[in-house]
């Protein structure tokens, strides 16, 4: 215990001597600054800084040479070791390179055929117009050129099937150039049959090569037609015994798929009754102007046969007719397409 107290006293004396030297040096330097030569400036800061550094060094050396006080157990008491926490730097994210790929167009340009027609409207003689027997009239159809080639006067409108009702079965186009996108009015002079009844005449367009010009609605050789009533509209019974003809057509309609399903379809079944054996030619006519090509159906005896037509659409309020060209020249129908 006595040794500990003596060591502490010596340590304190050393510190006192060091502070005495420090303050004495500062006072001496201050005096030097106060009595500097006139006109000559002395920078005090470097001098004080160097003196302070010398004093701190002597103080540190004195503390190292002084014996450290010992604890009761003989182990030097150095106190707790300070803990220094260094800030942790957040990792810098590496830049992400994004490759931008320009979209590749997959649209295939639409290639229009040279000859393509579209029915626009009946300029004259709407369907069901009534005429006296043998009465003359002019039928006019308006057609648009929707192909890629011009139409010239060497194109013609040609009778296809049904009742001709015309002096000419082929009529040339007007003397004009009908460019793609233009419309043309096609006129044919006709006369009603000399007997009572309902009659229909089918026409189409031919190019200079003699080929039928297709229509966007189909039925190139039956896309244009005239439908009239002659006289009373009630044909006389001119059937001869054993003559082949279609006696009747009964329609049934079914819907496959939901009403708003564009892949849904109507299935039209026509049950055709014949008077004897023979072959009929017929075509389907739709409410949107579409007409199928003429087809044939053969009966081996007086019997009934079924014809089926399918129309894929999500619309309602449509209709389909069956036109029997041979032997009747008569239209049967109409089958109404109504979505329940």
Image (tube, rainbow, N blue to C red):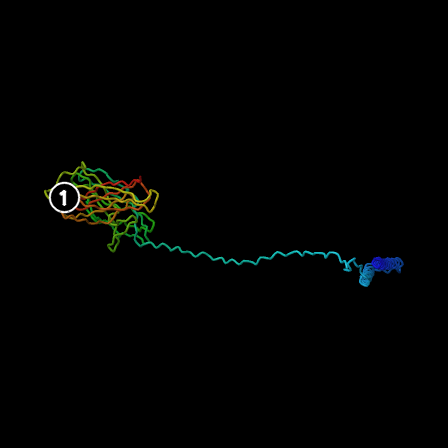
Q: Which residue is mark 1?
A: 275
Q: Is residue 27 above or below residue 223?
A: below
Q: Is residue 285 above or below residue 102?
A: above
Give the quadrant of the C terminus. top left
Residue 39 image position (x, y, % from top left): 87, 59
Label 1, secondary structure: give it. loop
Q: In the displayed image of the protein, which residue is found farthest to the left? A: 241
Residue 73 visible to the viewer? yes
Please count the marks in the image: 1
Closer-to-camera residue (88/235): 88
Label 1 environment density (alpha carbons within 10 Å; few <14, some 14–19, many ≥20):
some
Splitting the image into 4 quarters, where does residue 126 fall?
Answer: top left
Residue 22 visible to the viewer? no
Residue 316 is left or right of residue 243, and the answer is: right
Residue 259 image position (x, y, % from top left): 33, 42
Q: Is residue 88 above or below residue 290?
A: below
Closer-to-camera residue (83/159): 83
Residue 160 image position (x, y, % from top left): 21, 49
Closer-to-camera residue (301/158): 301
Residue 154 is left or right of residue 303, and the answer is: right
Splitting the image into 4 quarters, where does residue 306 fall?
Answer: top left
Give the quadrant of the N terminus. bottom right
Residue 262 image position (x, y, % from top left): 34, 46
């Amino acid at each position: 215990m006595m040794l500990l107290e003596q060591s502490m006293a010596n340590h304190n004396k050393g510190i006192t001597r060091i502070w005495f030297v420090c303050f004495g040096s500062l006072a001496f330097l201050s005096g030097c600054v106060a009595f500097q030569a006139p006109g000559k400036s002395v920078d005090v800061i470097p001098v004080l800084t160097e003196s302070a550094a010398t004093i701190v060094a002597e103080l540190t050396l004195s503390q190292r040479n002084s014996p450290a006080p010992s604890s009761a157990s003989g182990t030097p008491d150095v106190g707790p070791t300070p803990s220094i926490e260094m800030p942790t730097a957040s990792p810098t994210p590496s830049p992400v390179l994004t490759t931008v790929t320009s979209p590749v167009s997959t649209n295939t340009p639409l290639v229009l055929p040279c000859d393509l027609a579209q029915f626009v409207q009946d300029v004259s003689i709407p369907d069901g117009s009534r005429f006296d027997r043998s009465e003359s009239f002019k039928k006019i159809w308006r057609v648009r050129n929707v192909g890629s080639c011009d139409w010239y006067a060497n194109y013609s409108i040609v009778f296809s099937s049904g009742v001709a009702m015309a002096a000419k079965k082929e009529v040339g186009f007007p003397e004009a150039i009908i460019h793609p996108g233009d419309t043309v009015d096609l006129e044919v002079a006709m006369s009603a049959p000399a007997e009572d009844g309902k009659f229909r005449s089918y026409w189409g367009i031919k190019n200079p090569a003699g080929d039928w010009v297709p229509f966007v609605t189909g039925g190139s050789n039956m896309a244009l037609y005239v439908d009239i009533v002659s006289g009373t509209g009630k044909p006389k019974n001119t059937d001869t015994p054993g003559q082949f003809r279609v006696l009747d057509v009964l329609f049934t309609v079914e819907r496959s798929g939901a009403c708003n399903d564009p892949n849904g379809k109507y299935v039209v079944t026509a049950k055709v009754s014949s008077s004897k054996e023979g072959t009929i030619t017929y075509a389907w006519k739709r409410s949107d102007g579409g007409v199928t090509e003429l087809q044939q159906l053969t009966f081996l005896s007086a019997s009934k046969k079924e014809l089926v037509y399918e129309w894929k659409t999500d619309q309602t309020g449509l209709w389909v007719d069956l036109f029997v060209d041979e032997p009747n020249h008569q239209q049967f129908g109409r089958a109404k397409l109504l979505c329940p």
